[in-house]
């Protein structure tokens, strides 16, 4: 029993789902719905493209920032190299003053200061050179990525233009297919289109009007023939009466009576 009830409700569910799917398919084939659906797809793609552009803009801003850092580091490296050369040149002057006496040179405070500065400049220079190399490598990779994304953006924009064109083609195809189906259904006698029903009704009215006109014409002809038949019948009856009167001798008396009646008329003044 419970299984039967379960099957019953599943059948209702399948029926409902089938009707919903059928209605959804029917609505999806509507040109207005298709146009609106394409519009939504286009808007979604535009939104994603704008988000993509924003991300690329952030990458380009990062690229510009790295370029500025690299330029600043390059200036620092050039400056440190000059400072190193200056410290070395000053230390050489001090060494030359002592004629190569190492002990005196190494005990000179100015020499020691130049030596310390040279070491600091060297270590700082190495750090900045390494940092500049890292930024330069990052910048190369970033520029490669940005260029790749730019190409992808251009490709997506071309696809968007194609979708815009495809929208009009799709709507036109649906309208054409719908019209062809209606015509085919009308020919096959299975169309439910109200337009075809109106055409059928108008054609029936025209046929009825033509039939009524034809009947009127035929009836008019029948009236004429009926009048002619009556006249012919009257003529035949009159001729038969005259013949009968002549047979029994009444026609001579009739003629005498008509003659006397004519002579008895008062002449006109």
Image: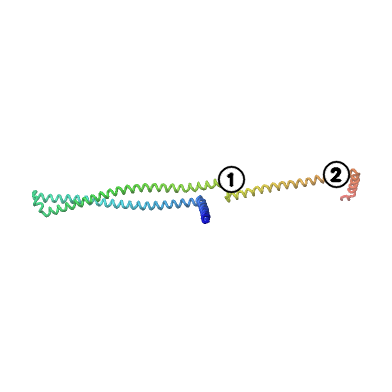
Residue 137 is at least partly visible in this image: yes
Q: Secondary structure at mark 1?
A: helix
Sequence-wise first label, 1 or 2: 1
Using a 10 Å C-alpha cutoff, classify the residue at mark 1 as few (fewer than 14 neighbours), some (14 to 19) or many (20 or more).
few
* Relative depth, front residue between 236 and 67: 67
Which type of secondary structure does the marked residue at label 2 adopt?
A: helix
Residue at the image point whose x is 59% and y is 45% from the top: 188
Residue that carries the numbered disc 2 in the rendered image: 240
Indicate which disc residue 188 carries. 1
Badge 1 vs badge 2, beta-carbon distance below 8 Å: no
Eye-nearest disc, 1 or 2 = 1
Can the viewer see residue 31?
Answer: no
**Nearest the camera: 140 or 99?**
140
Task: Name the residue at 48% across, 47% down.
Answer: 170
Q: Is residue 54 left or right of residue 109?
A: right
Q: Is residue 93 left or right of residue 235?
A: left
Mark 2 burial class by Cα count in 10 Å: few <14, some 14-19, many 20+:
few
**Mark 1 to mark 2 CA distance (whole Å):** 67 Å
């Amino acid at each position: 029993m419970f299984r039967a009830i379960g099957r019953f409700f599943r059948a209702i569910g399948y029926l409902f789902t089938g009707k919903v799917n059928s209605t959804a398919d029917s609505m999806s084939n509507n040109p207005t719905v298709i146009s609106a659906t394409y519009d939504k797809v286009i808007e979604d793609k535009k939104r994603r493209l704008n988000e993509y552009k924003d991300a690329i803009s952030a990458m380009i801003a990062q690229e510009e920032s790295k370029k500025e850092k690299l330029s600043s580091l390059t200036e620092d490296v050039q400056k440190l190299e000059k400072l190193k050369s200056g410290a070395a040149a000053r230390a050489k002057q001090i060494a030359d003053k002592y004629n190569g006496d190492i002990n005196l040179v190494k005990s000179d405070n100015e020499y020691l200061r130049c030596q310390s500065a040279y070491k600091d400049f060297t270590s700082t220079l190495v750090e900045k050179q390494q940092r500049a190399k890292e930024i330069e490598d990052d910048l190369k990779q970033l520029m490669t990525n940005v260029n790749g994304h730019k190409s992808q953006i251009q490709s997506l924009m071309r696809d968007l233009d194609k979708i815009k064109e495809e929208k009009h083609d799709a709507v036109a195809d649906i309208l054409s297919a719908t019209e062809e189906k209606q015509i085919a259904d009308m020919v096959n006698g299975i169309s439910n289109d109200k337009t075809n029903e109106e055409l059928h009704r108008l054609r029936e009215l025209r046929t009825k009007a033509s039939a009524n006109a034809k009947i009127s014409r035929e009836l008019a002809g029948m009236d004429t023939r009926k009048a002619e038949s009556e006249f012919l019948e009257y003529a035949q009856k009159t001729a038969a009466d005259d013949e009968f009167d002549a047979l029994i001798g009444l026609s001579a008396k009739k003629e005498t009576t008509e003659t006397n009646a004519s002579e008895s008329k008062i002449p006109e003044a």
